[in-house]
């Protein structure tokens, strides 16, 4: 994060507050335009061949294409995206959210040009949701406005689905997916690795402690004379004598008599 801090000090004044809100509003406008003009959306998607022929606006306009054609689903999706944007901007500030989104756009564009992937803005919005889930894992949302679910469980479900796609895809698809999630990997990758290392270290220390601890069936004290223990006779009291052995109070050696001066 030191690099990001440095970038924010130098270029923070250029950040766009409320960027995701603007994108949500433009998504709604594009959705309505697509309803009235069915061929309109095809002029906005990320088509590398068209970009190379001069239609450079596609490098930006693909983020405005809605992911669904349903009025109800687009309403829920845009509301959710608005909430995610507000949450992330509240945690990061405008500059870091802008940077995160910009890196995601670069990654999605690279995936399209280098590997032929047609992710549009799906992976970009997914990376926003994963970032939101990192900061607000226990927030409860309602899927389709009905089913309550914590954000972290939805994120895990989506991650499992993408993991299956990643494993089933060819090398080009895997590279494209990694490129599209480059923003998430850059922002959270080091923290995730540190977290996993910490958990592994804690697990190793716990295992060592459990191995060093005496078994539960082993007594803590056992008299070397009568062999009774704190487990067999919990009513007894035990002492450790000067010779280092455990004795019950009945067989505790008496101290030697004092030598007269």
Image: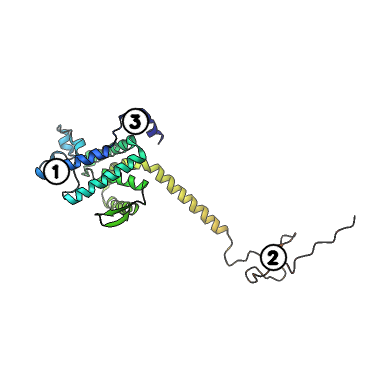
Q: Is residue 177 visible?
A: no
Rendering quarter of residue 23:
top left
* Residue on which the image places disc 1: 32
Task: Tell me the crowding category of disc 3: few under 14, some 14 to 19, or many 20 or more residues within 10 angstroms, Cα based.
Answer: some
Q: State the SS at label 3.
A: helix
In this rendering, the count of numbered labels is: 3
At x 15%, y 33%, the residue is: 55
Which quadrant would the C terminus be assigned to in this image? Answer: bottom right
Question: For residue 238, which numbered disc appears in the image?
Answer: 2
Q: Is residue 167 above or below residue 96?
A: below
At x 33%, y 34%, the residue is: 95
Marks 1 and 2: CB-CB under 8 Å?
A: no
- Alpha-carbon distance for marks 1 and 2? 84 Å
At x 12%, y 43%, the residue is: 34
- Alpha-carbon distance for marks 1 and 3? 34 Å
Give the colour scheme shown: rainbow
Sequence-wise, which precedes: disc 3 or disc 2? 3
**Residue farthest along the right direction in this orientation:** 261
Rendering quarter of residue 104:
top left
Left or right of residue 62: residue 94: right
Which quadrant would the N terminus be assigned to in this image? Answer: top left
Task: Tell me the crowding category of disc 2: few under 14, some 14 to 19, or many 20 or more residues within 10 angstroms, Cα based.
Answer: many
Sequence-wise, which precedes: disc 1 or disc 3? 3
Q: Position of residue 63 (x, y in %)?
A: 22, 40
Marks 1 and 3: CB-CB under 8 Å?
A: no
Q: State the SS at label 1.
A: helix
Left or right of residue 222: residue 71: left
Q: State the SS at label 2.
A: strand
* Residue on which the image places disc 3: 12
- Alpha-carbon distance for marks 3 and 2? 70 Å
**Residue farthest along the top direction in this orientation:** 10
């Amino acid at each position: 994060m030191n690099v990001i801090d440095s970038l924010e000090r130098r270029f923070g004044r250029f950040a766009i507050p409320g960027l995701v809100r603007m994108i949500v509003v433009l998504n709604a406008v594009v959705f309505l335009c697509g309803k009235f003009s069915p061929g309109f959306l095809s002029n906005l998607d990320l088509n590398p061949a068209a970009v190379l022929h001069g239609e450079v606006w596609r490098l930006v306009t693909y983020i405005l294409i809605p992911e669904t054609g349903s009025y109800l689903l687009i309403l829920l999706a845009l509301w959710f995206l608005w909430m995610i944007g507000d949450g992330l901007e509240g945690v990061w500030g405008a500059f870091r959210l802008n940077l995160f989104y910009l890196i995601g756009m670069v990654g999605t564009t690279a995936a399209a040009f280098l590997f032929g992937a047609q992710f549009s803005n799906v992976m970009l919005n997914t990376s926003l949701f994963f970032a939101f889930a990192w900061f607000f894992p226990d927030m409860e949302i309602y899927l389709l406005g009905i089913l309550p679910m914590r954000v972290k469980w939805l994120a895990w479900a989506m991650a499992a689905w993408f993991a299956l796609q990643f494993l089933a895809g060819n090398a080009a698809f895997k590279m494209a997916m990694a490129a599209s999630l480059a923003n998430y990997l850059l922002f959270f990758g080091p923290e995730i690795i540190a977290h996993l290392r910490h958990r592994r270290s804690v697990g190793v220390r716990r295992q060592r402690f459990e191995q060093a601890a005496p078994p539960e069936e082993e007594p803590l004290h056992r008299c070397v004379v009568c062999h009774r223990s704190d487990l067999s006779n919990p009513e007894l009291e035990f002492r450790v004598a000067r010779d280092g052995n455990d004795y019950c109070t009945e067989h505790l050696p008496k101290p030697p008599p004092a030598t007269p001066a």
